[in-house]
Image: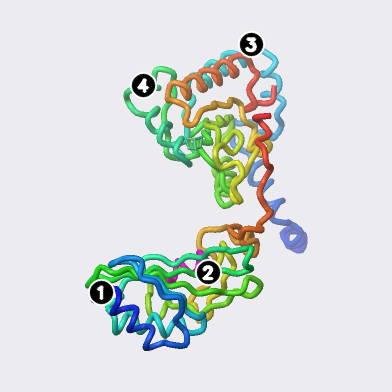
Amino acid sequence: MDAKTIIDSISNEFSDSISNTLIESEIRVSAYVSSPDVVEVCRYLKESLGFDHLSCESVVDYIKRDEFEVVYHIASYDHPVVLTLKAILPRDNPVIDSIVDVYWNANWYERENYELYGVSYTNHPYLKVLVLPEEMLGEWPLRKDYEGFPQKTAKNLV
Amino acid sequence: MGEINQNITQKTNEKVEEEVNQEEIPGVITTTSNAISDFIKKTAAQDFINWGRKNSLWFMTQPMGCCGVEMIATGCAHYDTDRFGIIPRNSPRHADVMIISGYVTKKYLPALKNLWEQMASPKWILAMGDCSISGGPFYESYSTVQNIDEIFPIDVFIPGCPPRPEALLEGFIQLQKKIAAKKDKGTNY
Ligand code: SF4
């Protein structure tokens, strides 16, 4: 399956929710998805287009646009194309459906995104902190407007 | 009977513990006061005790950051720390020295305090590497604990990122000098 077939296929299947498709090269394609449909799109990718491997799920904080982008890198063991799927969320209420039902390994990615950015995933089986200490939950340290850093200079060096 | 029952009900857990501690052993006089050791501290006997202590500084193998790798290397055969009486131990119960060998995160600090509490006195702390001294390259991270010297009584700071094994050895030797001079923080002189 080549890049163009994949893009055409998802654009036809989800003409309402898929936008800004881009074929960067033979093996890299990207698309934006509207956030309510992300589970459906992922299920279609996995079952019909052979994208059986979620390699990464991350969040980018675009503070000037007042938006989060949830980024899914989805690849396949059968064909060489890697799809970058992005969903835009509002910064004041970032809620998106969990894709653990489709890709089980999204579990820990989503927990980490939750503790560091505060993106909350509905239908996640166990949305708790992953590596942060419990008492830091709610500070969302990787957001661009996070202020809770320790001293700016090291006391012993000045 | 009535009296005994009353006594039992009045005892709190604390009192029970105290009584167990003060239980009489035949031929042995037990005390809870520090008078004897306080007296010895003022005499020349303490010099002899300190000579013994400084020549058996067993440290806890508790590598925390990348400095921990240098710490392990120091404990290996090449540097032969045994000639100074410095031996790596795996249990805090056996150790005299804790080396803070790397970044202390907010999540790790409670565990580190636990380890420190578990060590038997007299005990000393070395701060190894820039991370434990001031935060090092991670000084501005959301999860780093800075100024660890406000939390632990640190005797020797060993700067470097990471300090070479020779530097760690030098730190130990400085600690030995401090103990010999009765300037260390492990004991109240
Ligand atoms: S001081 Fe340097 S080598 Fe040591 S733990 Fe920190 S970053 Fe690693």
Three-letter amino acid code of the residue under disc 2? Glu
Residue in front for this viewpoint, B138 or B173:
B138
Dot 3 corresponds to which residue? Answer: B44
Query: Mark 4, mark 3: which one is toward the viewer?
Result: 4
**Which of B17 and B171 lies nearest the eye of the viewer?**
B171
> Does the magenta-highlighted stretch encompass residue B71?
no
Label 4 and label 3: CA atoms lie apart by 31 Å
Q: Which mark is residue A2?
A: 1
Residues in magenta, as a range? A106-113
Please state which amino acid type lies under the numbered disc 3. Answer: Ala
**Looking at mark 4, is its residue's CB closer than 8 Å to ligand 1?**
no
Query: Which residue shows up at 36% across the image and 83% down it?
Result: A10
Residue annotated with mark 4: B80
Q: Are marks 2 and 3 on the same chain?
A: no
Q: Residue at x 61, y 74 (%)?
A: A90
x and y percent of residue B56 in the render? 47, 23
Amino acid marked by disc 4: Asp
Write down the residue under mark 2: A69
CB of mark 2 near ligand 1 (< 8 Å): no
